[in-house]
Amino acid sequence: ENDQKREDSKTLYKILVDITGQEGKMWGPSIIGFGDYRYKYASGREGDWFYIGFSPRAQNLTIYLMDGAETYTDLLDKMGKYKTGKSCLYIKSLEKIDVEILKEVMTQSVTRFKNKK
């Protein structure tokens, strides 16, 4: 719907392909995920998910950092305008942030997550 969000999504997709070395795939109707892993809770419940992903939501671009957004507070404080949830980073537009810092956050997240599994 939104031309800026569409362009930001294309840019973010290309960045994540470069970082992960993989093409993204759809996880449900609106999330594009990169990489995949099998998780298992102590309860025995299992499932599949991605290392990192994003969704062009109506209000924001939502970036899913599987090791948690709070891990990157120092870097994110230098990035520009954003909000966070536990594992989500919410950005209105790539124009409002330092994309190089976002790349660093996403690269570190993918590296940490792959090393942790």
Image: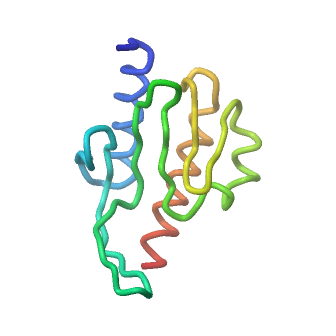
Instruction: Check the picture and name the quadrant holding the N terminus.
Output: top left
Give the side of residue 85 with respect to residue 33, left or right.
right
20 or 67: nearer the viewer:
67
Q: Is residue 98 above or below residue 4?
A: below
The part of the image, by quadrant, that contains residue 2 is top left
On screen, residue 83 versus residue 91, left or right, reads right
Question: What residue is shown at x 49% (from left), y 39% (from top)?
Answer: 62
Which residue is rendered at x = 54% and y = 26% of the image?
94
From the viewer's side, name the closer residue of 18 and 60. 60
Determine whether 59 is above or below 47 in the image: above
Q: Nearer the viewer, residue 45 or 86?
A: 45
Give coordinates of residue 82: x percent, y percent.
Answer: 66, 35
Colouring method of the image: rainbow
Outermost residue on the front side: it is 43
Residue 76 picture location, percent across and down: 70, 45
Q: Position of residue 77 (x, y in %)?
A: 76, 43
Q: Residue at x 31, y 38 (%)?
A: 30
Q: Is residue 22 left or right of residue 80?
A: left
Q: Is residue 70 above or below residue 92?
A: below
Image point (24%, 45%), residue name: 26
The picture places residue 75, in percent across and down from the top left corner, at: 71, 49
Count of labels in the image = 0
Quarter of the image where one finds residue 48: bottom left
Check the picture and name the quadrant holding the C terminus.
bottom left
